[in-house]
Image (cartoon, coloured by chain):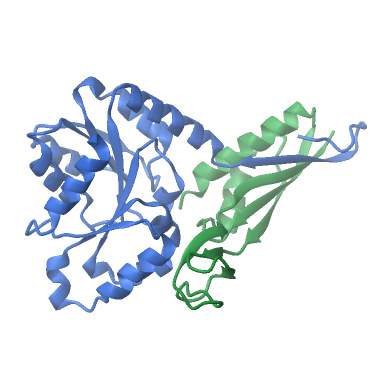
Chain colours: A blue, B green
Amino acid sequence: MKPESMSQGQPLKIQVIEDILSENRRIATENRRLLNEKRVFAVNIMSSPGAGKTSLILQTIAHLREKVRIGVIEGDVASQIDAERIKREGVHVTQINTGGECHLDANMVRSALGKLELEEIDLLLIENVGNLICPAEFELGEHLKAMISSIPEGDDKPYKYPLMFTDVDALVINKIDLLPYLEFDLEGFRKGAKALNRDIRIFEVSCKTGEGIEEWVDWLKKMAFS
Amino acid sequence: MHELAITQSLLSIALEHASRAGAKRITRINLVIGDISSIVDDCVQFYFDFISKDTIAEGATLSFKRVSPRFRCYTCGEEFAKEADFTCPSCGALGGEVVAGREFFIESIEVET
């Protein structure tokens, strides 16, 4: 803040230069500190509605439950449907209903963390609200960002939603079993994603048939615990 | 559609800076917003008019300075504006690091003291 003039009644221009999301970032940093202290590795899972966030979480639980203790934060605009599905798997789960907000933010995650027994969790999967735009702007305190894009959504997503692709560590292309039935330029899609983020890890999976899940889970385990 | 949350943050930042300067009224808030961030100007102004009621920022104009995306080529290092498919015009290689277009901050506020 640098007042250019302080005389009474005069218009004054004050230099601010402050990031509008700085408060969210501050809370996200606190969340990450808490998670580190409790030795919990957190993954923020983002996608548009119906791409397979819950299915990927269920597959990940099925593959890793014998080896690591998993917790889940379920973000949804309304309803407990996904949380109920996950609870049946016997893992720690807590629901955030955003009440209209189209994304999770660090503050919502902070209160969700308070409801989980973090001592009993090694890997925390955070299912964001189904949306390819807003969640990309809000850091939660996670250690890893993953996005899911599914074959029926089309291959133009890197061009339409660049921010999401720029920021994630992993891209999971789900419903790969549908590739023979739909027009989807897989090579072009991979190229677009790599153009925006050359370090992005790409996995081709089908949560339905289990194809490719092993590779995703192995990578996740390596990132989290080695 | 996350403009409400964002508008609340920007209002509180502006109010804090105004109060530190002992301002009586905020007349203008100058924002810098990159085109890659998905903010709709009209929508922010709409929420702002609503939530700034009964604060010293009521009636303030929001000014949006937009920044176009620019990339630095992964291959040759040249900077370029976004093309349809992220191809570098200098070397023809695909892709680059985003160097502009993600801005999202309050540059300054104009107040009456």
Q: How many marks do you count on the picture?
A: 0
Front residue (pair A153, B70) = B70
Front residue (pair A192, A222) = A222
**The image quarter in which residue B64 lies:** bottom right
Q: Which residue is painted at 85% across and 40% down in the image?
A: A12
Q: Quadrant of the N terminus of chain A?
A: top right
Q: Which residue is painted at 8% across and 37% down in the image?
A: A89
Q: Is residue B27 left or right of residue A210?
A: right
| Residue A124 at x, y percent in the picture | 25, 35
Q: Quadrant of the C terminus of chain A?
A: top left
| Residue A174 at x, y percent in the picture | 20, 60
| Residue B66 at x, y percent in the picture | 64, 60
* A20 versus A213 height, above or below: above
Q: Which residue is painted at 59% across and 52% down in the image?
A: B103
Q: Which residue is painted at 39% across and 38% down in the image?
A: A140
Front residue (pair B9, A217) = A217
Q: Is residue A73 visible?
A: no
Q: Is residue A55 visible?
A: yes
| Residue A17 at x, y percent in the picture | 68, 42
**The image quarter in which residue B72 lies:** bottom right
Which residue sits furthest right? A7
Which residue sits furthest front? B76
